[in-house]
Amino acid sequence: MEARNCFCGTPAIIRTSWTQANPGRRFYCCARTVQNCGYFGWAEPQLCARAMEIIPGLLNNMNNLRASARENANQARKWKWLLAFSWCLFVLYVVMN
């Protein structure tokens, strides 16, 4: 991809659109955050209709898997604490008897 400059003269940066209309499509925009000049330009041609149908479903599945992985990690952490606590109680019981 060719390098582009935005209206204010700074090099434009490439970002990825995750909107429903253009999922995964990359575009150029102004790199400034405070005084953005409003430059916008597509970096690649529009996706085919099939890709536009498939990508949102894949993104949804990926987000669901990430949420499930976070939930599983939290559950595993709770089980580890419970196991450690039960071992402490067991050691305390053995020492007392």
Image: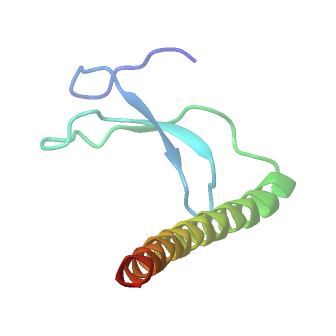
Q: What's the residue at 58%, 18% (across, down)?
A: 1
Where is residue 31 drawn, in percent x and y? 28, 33
Q: How many marks?
A: 0
Where is residue 11 drawn, in percent x and y? 32, 20
Task: Report the colour scheme.
Answer: rainbow
Q: What's the residue at 67%, 61% (across, down)?
A: 62
- Judged left or right of residue 45, residue 3 is left
Where is residue 30 drawn, in percent x and y? 30, 35
Q: Residue furthest top?
A: 2
> Is 11 above or below relative to 15?
above
> Is 3 above or below relative to 51?
above
Residue 81 vs residue 67, the one in the foreground: 81
Quadrant (top left/top right/bottom left/bottom right) for the C terminus: bottom left
Indicate the quadrant where residue 88 lies: bottom left
- Judged left or right of residue 12, residue 71 is right
Q: What's the residue at 13%, 41% (across, down)?
A: 35
Q: What's the residue at 51%, 74% (across, down)?
A: 83
Residue 46 vs residue 72, the one in the foreground: 72
Where is residue 93 drawn, in percent x and y? 42, 84
Indicate the quadrant where residue 58 lies: bottom right
